[in-house]
Amino acid sequence: MGILAWIVVGLIAGWLASRVMKGRGSGLVGDLVLGVVGALLGGLIASTLLNMPNPVNGINVPSILVAFLGAVILIAILRAVSGRRRLF
């Protein structure tokens, strides 16, 4: 997947995850980073647990869904680790 596709999928997934998790938002760059890292995490989880060969493979609904779920998991982990401070 090209860098532009990673950026688009990451931006969409990060924005959706920050809205669903009712965070204060982290801006355009923060949502982008959150989405790209979420795509990596979601892709790792989907490939190991669900045996999907290439879960994030372009700008399409399944890729955005995998990245979104990874970003939601990432936000939950960050909130659990941070304690009282609210991240994302």
Image (cartoon, rainbow, N blue to C red):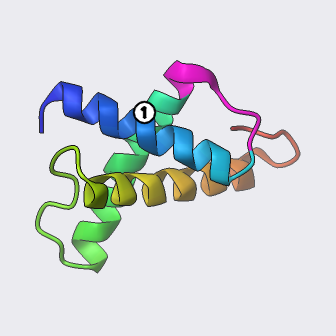
Taking the image as shown, residue 14 lies to the left or right of residue 59, namely right
Residue sitting at 35 percent across and 59 percent down? 66
Estimate the x, y position of residue 72 in percent, counting from the top left.
Answer: 55, 55
Number of other residues with Cα within 10 Å of mark 1, as a class: few under 14, some 14 to 19, many 20 or more = many
Measuring 54% from the left and 59% from the top, which residue is drawn there? 73
Membership of 33 in magenta stretch? no
> Which x, y percent locates residue 47?
22, 68
At 29% across and 57% down in the image, what residue appears?
A: 61
Instruction: Specify start and end residues of the magenta stretch as a single range.
Output: 23-30
| Rendered location of residue 25, percent (x, y) | 69, 32
Give above or below for 36 relative to 77. Answer: above
Most extreme residue toward the bottom is: 50
State which quarter of the image contains the C terminus: top right
Q: Which residue is mark 1?
A: 11
Any magenta on residue 26?
yes
**Residue name at image x 62 percent, y 43 percent:** 18
Question: Callout 1: helix, strand or loop?
Answer: helix
Compared to residue 46, the image places residue 12 above or below, namely above
Which residue is at the front of the view, 41 or 58?
A: 58
